Image (cartoon, grey):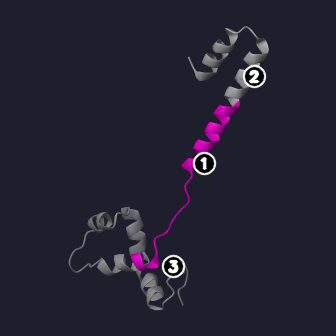
Amino acid sequence: MNLYQEVALSFNKVGDPCSTVLAIVATAVSLIAYLIGAARNMSSKRSSSPLWERHDIVASFNTENGTKVAKLAGDFDIPTTTLTTILKNKDKIICTYEAGRSNERVSGNPY
């Protein structure tokens, strides 16, 4: 038995048909509000790590020592796909960091 049926049964015991309709409407409204709230909580906004943190990640990655991407991702507690994207953009990150533009995004041409 679902919530709708339980509410309808509890108000049917009272015997007033108006209160049954009101209970059904109230249940529907609260269910819709719950679903809307759940949908809002599921959609999270993207966040980006600060430039200094991405610079630290790039600086700690060393191909000569055989640093593994998965281990480095675990050390910084980020997904491996995020780490590979950071490493792919390492030249832009280093250039932007050294230019002192720490609050800028590193997505376009850093020059």
Q: Position of residue 84 (x, y in %)?
A: 38, 69
Task: Specify the farthest residue to the left.
Answer: 65
Of labels 1 and 3, earlier in sequence is 1
* Mark 2, residue position: 22
Q: Position of residue 68 (x, y in %)?
A: 26, 69
* Range drawn in magenta: 29-54
Distance Cα–Cα, label 1 vs label 2: 27 Å
| Mark sitting on residue 106 | 3
**In this rendering, which labeled residue sits more in front, label 3 or label 2?**
2
Left/right of residue 101 with respect to residue 6 in the rendered view: left
In front here: 77 or 95? 77
In front here: 11 or 89? 11
Residue at left 54%, top 90%? 111
Local SS, label 2: helix
**In this rendering, which labeled residue sits more in front, label 1 or label 2?**
2
The N terminus - image quarter:
top right
Vertical placement of 85 versus 79: above or below? below
| Mark sitting on residue 40 | 1
Q: Reply yes or no: does residue 42 show up in magenta.
A: yes
Local SS, label 1: helix
Residue at left 32%, top 66%? 73
The amino acid type, in three-letter code, at marker 1 is: Arg
The amino acid type, in three-letter code, at marker 2 is: Leu
Vertical placement of 56 versus 98: above or below? above
